[in-house]
């Protein structure tokens, strides 16, 4: 049965075109023949032309020349270019006619790529930094109002921080109190006090023994606003804090030293331990003979070791295992706080968000500062403590001349010279007790 449309025969289709070849070799690529346009009126009812039979295909016009012949028939130029089958000689590549080629892909614009990559990175850093700043700033507990402190000495050069470690047990469970050997006393007292001076001639960290003999001056009550006249009453320095909190402590320190305090920073027992744990522990060297104190929980062998939060708190609170009790303890506190600041400021903490944010969170949640304290002030304080630990600054005790009634008496002449050097931001030459 002939499946071809009516009017077509095998002769019309040629011997091989459109059906299998007897040859085992595939046919080669061939160019399409030129098609001669029919005379005017073809298939349109013109003279000598007739429409093809119904359902049939019109008779194809004759082809001029052999395969690939570009010459016209009977002097007629069809106006068509010779089409080439893929792979035919003279072909222009994939889908291209003779003489056509693909344009080469343009080289990547590395300068543009680097520019936009840099812009993206900088934008992310700015957004992250701004977000971190506002997050950290919102966590600062600005509870101390230094505007309530009266009769203040004139401010000098540089910045003076009063750093206080309190024995506050706020928020601690009975189990935590037992673990940290803090006891269960109500209220809070100052367990350690230091003045940190930052300036252009080196940083100085001065410990104020809590048993220092000081005079309570005239002051205004932080809560009542009532003025309490000074009577010349002498007490231990930590009693000022117990009597009316941070504002009276600042007033007492300023009155007895003549040094203006710019900022106040306080941290409790639990907060101190949490910071140490968040930073991954602090390396400290225990002096020869080791350290053992049942009341603080200290039990350390001599030599270098890394202390966790619980051990660190025991170390800085130890008194009874030391020869000079309070004076030696203040030196240990200075040493440890400087080492802690050094650990916090290392690239391993600052550049590692998995350490930085927990450390910042633990520290900021635990600190109580004055209302004018900012994050840059806090950063300045930590960097100064790091420099003291690195040997670029000086650490010392307040100069002591003796004792009276169990209180440590300051050396007035040395204290006066020390304060003058700090006020003028000069290199400290005074030695401590």
Image: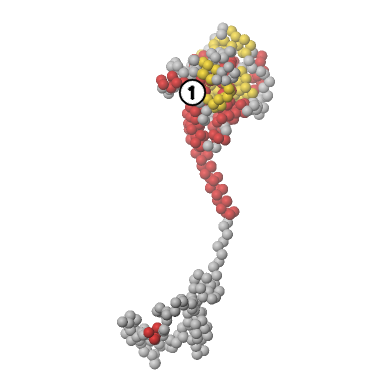
Q: Give coordinates of residue 141: x percent, y percent.
A: 48, 28
Quadrant location of the C terminus in the rendered image? top right
Decide if residue 357 is on the left or right side of residue 47.
Answer: right
**Vertical arrangement, residue 86 with respect to residue 423, above or below:** below
Q: Quadrant of residue 163?
A: top right
- The residue at 41%/84% (across/down) is 14
Q: Give coordinates of residue 126: x percent, y percent.
A: 53, 42
Q: Give coordinates of residue 431: x percent, y percent.
A: 66, 18
The answer to whether residue 216 is visible is no
Q: Give coordinates of residue 410: x percent, y percent.
A: 61, 13
- What residue is disc 1 on? 310
Q: Nearer the viewer, residue 201 or 66?
A: 66
- Marks counted in the figure total 1
Could you tell me which secondary element the residue under label 1 belongs to?
helix
- The residue at 36%/84% (across/down) is 8
Quadrant location of the N terminus in the rendered image? bottom left
The answer to whether residue 407 is visible is yes
**Vertical arrangement, residue 279 with respect to residue 10, above or below:** above
Q: Residue furthest top?
A: 405
Decide if residue 86 is on the left or right side of residue 13.
Answer: right
**Vertical arrangement, residue 262 with respect to residue 41, above or below:** above
Q: Nearer the viewer, residue 94 or 432?
A: 94
Q: Residue furthest front?
A: 24
């Amino acid at each position: 049965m002939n499946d071809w449309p009516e009017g077509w025969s095998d002769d019309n289709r040629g011997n091989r075109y459109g059906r299998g070849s007897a040859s085992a070799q595939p046919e080669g690529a061939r160019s399409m023949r030129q098609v001669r346009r029919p005379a005017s009126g073809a298939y349109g009812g013109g003279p000598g032309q007739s429409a093809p039979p119904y359902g049939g295909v019109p008779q194809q016009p004759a082809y001029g020349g052999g395969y690939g012949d570009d010459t016209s028939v009977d002097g007629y130029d069809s106006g068509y270019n010779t089409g080439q089958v893929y792979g035919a000689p003279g072909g222009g590549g994939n889908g291209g006619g003779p003489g056509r080629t693909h344009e080469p892909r343009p080289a990547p614009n590395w300068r543009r790529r680097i520019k936009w990559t840099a812009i993206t990175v900088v934008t992310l850093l700015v957004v992250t930094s701004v977000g971190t700043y506002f997050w950290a700033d919102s966590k600062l507990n600005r509870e101390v109002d230094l505007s309530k402190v009266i009769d203040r000495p004139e401010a000098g050069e540089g910045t003076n921080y009063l750093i206080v470690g309190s024995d506050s047990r706020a928020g601690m469970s009975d189990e935590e109190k037992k673990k940290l050997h803090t006891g269960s006393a109500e209220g809070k007292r100052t367990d350690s006090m230091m003045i940190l001076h930052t300036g252009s001639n080196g940083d100085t960290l001065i410990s104020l023994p809590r048993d220092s003999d000081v005079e309570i001056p005239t002051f205004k009550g932080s809560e009542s606003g009532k003025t309490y006249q000074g009577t010349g009453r002498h007490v231990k320095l930590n009693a000022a804090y117990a009597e009316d909190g941070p504002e009276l402590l600042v007033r007492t320190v300023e009155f007895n030293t003549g040094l203006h305090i710019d900022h106040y920073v306080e941290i409790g027992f639990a907060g101190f331990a949490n910071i140490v744990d968040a930073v991954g522990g602090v390396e400290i060297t225990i002096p020869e003979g080791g350290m053992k104190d049942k009341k603080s929980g200290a039990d350390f062998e001599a030599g270098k070791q890394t202390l966790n939060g619980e051990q660190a708190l025991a170390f800085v609170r130890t008194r009874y295992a030391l020869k000079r009790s309070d004076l030696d303890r203040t030196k240990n506190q200075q040493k440890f706080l400087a080492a802690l600041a050094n650990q916090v400021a290392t690239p391993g903490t600052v550049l590692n968000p998995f350490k930085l944010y927990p450390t910042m969170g633990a520290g900021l949640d635990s600190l109580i500062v004055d209302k004018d304290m900012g994050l840059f002030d806090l950063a300045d304080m930590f960097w100064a403590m790091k420099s003291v630990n690195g040997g670029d600054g000086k650490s010392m005790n307040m100069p002591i001349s003796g004792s009276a009634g169990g209180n440590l008496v300051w050396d007035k002449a040395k204290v006066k010279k020390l304060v003058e050097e700090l006020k003028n931001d000069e290199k400290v030459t005074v030695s401590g007790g």
